[in-house]
Image (spheres, rainbow, N blue to C red):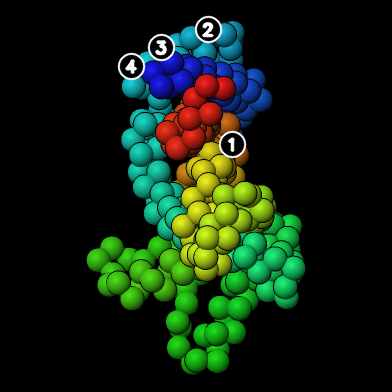
Amino acid sequence: MAAFLLRRTVRAVLQAVLGASLVYLLAAAALDPRAHLAGRTPRPPDAVIDARLARLNLDPRVPPSARYRAWAAGVLRGDLGRTLDGRPAGAELRGRLGVSVRLVLPGAVLGSAFGVVLGSWAAAKRGRAADRLVSLGTYVLAAVPMFVLAVLLQIAAVAVNDVTGVRALTWTGEPAPGAGGLERVRHEVLPTLVLALAQAALLARYQRGRMLDVLDAGFVRAARAKGLRRRGALLRHALRPALIPLTACVPQTAGLLLLGGMFAEQIFARHGLGEWLADAVARGDVNAVAAVGCLAACAVPAAALAGDVLHGLLDPRVRAA
C-alpha cells in the first residue's frame, strides 16, 4: 500500500507542477498587462508603467523563463505575487475560493448522490419504461451545455414566481450578510440545481453501466438462488462492487465541476473565481490568471489522488497495478 500511495502521490505532484507551469508560461506569453496600464485615463508615463511592471514581475523585456523562475520561487514560499492593482493574489484567491466552494460543493454532493441512486434504479429496471426514460433524460442533460441549462431554469423560475405571486426563487447575486435561512435557500436553489443535474447526468450513465455488469455476475445469481429476494440481492451484493469504480470516476469530474462552476458564477452573478479569472484575462493580469491556474492544477490531481487512494483501499487489484 505504501508503494501504491507513493506512486500516486509522485504522479499527482508532477501533474500539478506541470499544469501550473504551463498555465503561467501561456499567460505570460499571451497576455499584455502593459496595454491595460497604458489604456488608463490619464495615461501614465512609460517610465511609470515600466517600473510598475518590473515590481510585479511582469516586465515584457525580461524573458518569460526568468519571470517564471521568479514566480515559481515565490509560489514555493507561499507568495502568488500581486495583481495589476497591487493586491496580494493569494489573499484575493482565498476570498474568491470561498464563494466558489459555497456554489459548487452543494451541487457536487447532491448531484453525486442523485446520480448513483438514479443509475442504480435504472439498471434494476433494465429494459422497462423507467430505464428508457432515465437513459433518455440523462443523455439529453449531458448534451445540454450548462449555461443553456441555467437559462432554462431561470425561465422556469420566472414562471414559478409569476404563478405563485411571490418571489420564491432568486437567480442573481448572493444573499446579504446576516440573511436568514429561507433567503439563502432562495438564492442557492437554482445554482445548486444546475450543477447537480449536470453531475447527476454523467454519474447516472456511468453507474447504470457498472450495475448492469454486476447484476449478471455469478455471486448475485448465487445469492438469488439461495432464496434472497431481488431487492436484497441488489442492495447487499450488487451495489457495493458497482460503487467501487465510481470512487475513481467522481474525483475525475472535479475539472468539469470547476469549469461548470465558473460558468455558473457568470450566469448567477457570483463574485467567485470564475468572475475573477474572466476579468483577469481581459485586463492581462498574468499573476491573477496564474493563481487560478495554479489552484486548478493542484485541485484536479489532488481529487484524482483521493479517488485513486479510496479505490485502492476498496479494491486490492488496483494496488498491484
Which sits in the foreground, 300 or 35? Answer: 300
- The first of marks 2 and 4 along the sequence is 2
The amino acid beneath tag 3 is Ala
Residue, far front: 226
- The first of marks 2 and 1 along the sequence is 2
Q: Nearer the viewer, mark 2 or mark 3?
A: 3
**Disc 2 versus disc 1: distance between alpha carbons?**
22 Å
For the N terminus, the quadrant is top left
Q: In percent of the image, x 40 and y 45: which residue is there?
A: 96
- The label on residue 77 is 4
Image height of 88 relative to 103, above or below: above
Which sits in the foreground, 72 or 55? Answer: 72
The residue that mark 2 highlights is: 66
Residue 77: tell me if it is visible: yes
The crowd level at tag 4 (other Cα within 10 Å; few <14, some 14-19, many 20+) is few
Does the CB distance between marks 3 and 4 fall below 8 Å?
Answer: yes
For the C terminus, the quadrant is top right
The amino acid beneath tag 4 is Arg
- The first of marks 2 and 3 along the sequence is 2
Q: In percent of the image, x 53 and y 47: which residue is there?
A: 241
- The label on residue 281 is 1
- The label on residue 73 is 3
Which sits in the foreground, 42 or 143? Answer: 143
Q: Nearer the viewer, mark 3 or mark 1?
A: 3
